[in-house]
Image: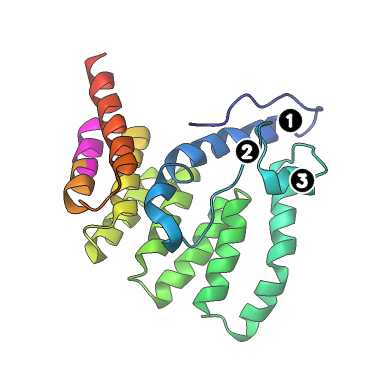
Amino acid sequence: MSDEGVEQATSGSVWQAKQVYAMAAVCLFLGLAIGYLFRGSQSPAPPISRPSNGQPAATASAMGGHMPSLDDMKQMADKKAAPLLERLKGDPNNSDLLIQVGNIYKATHQFKEAAGYYDKVLQVNPNNVAIRTEMASCLYYNGDVDGAISQLQQSLHYDPKDANSLFNLGMIKWQGKQDGKGALAAWQALLKSNPQLSEDRKAAVQKLMADVHMQGKS
């Protein structure tokens, strides 16, 4: 499910780059792979596409095929976000612009910055469940497991049946808190409250539940 096997590049920023792609593998596993089976067309941010060499397509292409560092990706995000940020000066509460900027920073693995812009959206529209789940993912990727869980619980306060929130809550409890029982409870609630899920989506969740059970027996 994850894209590992990053080849070593030149010295200097290699360790930073390895950290970037280790995190990218987590992103794919948590939110940008199975999670997007549940988001569908409602997702405010597209998943990062990855070619066979393990590099994110957009960043690898922009860097001429070389593995970018975190600083490289930050510079790319700042440049792409600049015209949107200029527009925000005259309309600081424009949710569409804030979401676009947040998406840019998330796609380039600048999770702290992305979470900040998603938070501004939620200050204007706190019941935006889709953006709250995006913010939760960014908090998780940035190391704030409890904050991520708190955001997902708030999402479920607004929409107790939200498939994204239930799925990611299970993933974070399992991977971030080693709470297999909590993960199973979230996924059981997901399957029970979303009977309309397609068979492949149900099978994906059931496979994860089986993995949790197997892990508990080992």
Around disc 1, counting alpha carbons within 10 Å, would you say few (fewer than 14), some (14 to 19), or many (20 or more)? some
Q: Residue at x 65, y 42 (%)?
A: 56
Residue 178 in sight = no
Gap between marks 1 and 2 measured at Cα: 10 Å
Q: Position of residue 194 (x, y in %)?
A: 22, 53
Q: Is residue 88 left or right of residue 11?
A: left
Give the amino acid type for the residue marked by disc 1 in the picture: Val
Q: Give the mark, 1 or 2, whose residue is nearer the N terminus.
A: 1
Give the amino acid type for the residue marked by disc 2 in the picture: Val
- Residue topped by disc 1: 14
Q: Quadrant of the C terminus?
A: top left
Around disc 2, counting alpha carbons within 10 Å, would you say few (fewer than 14), some (14 to 19), or many (20 or more)? many
Residue sitting nearer the eye, 185 or 142 = 185
Determine the main secondary structure of the stretch shown in magenta. helix
Where does the magenta region start and end? 178-187
Which mark is nearer the camera, 2 or 3?
3
- Residue topped by disc 2: 20
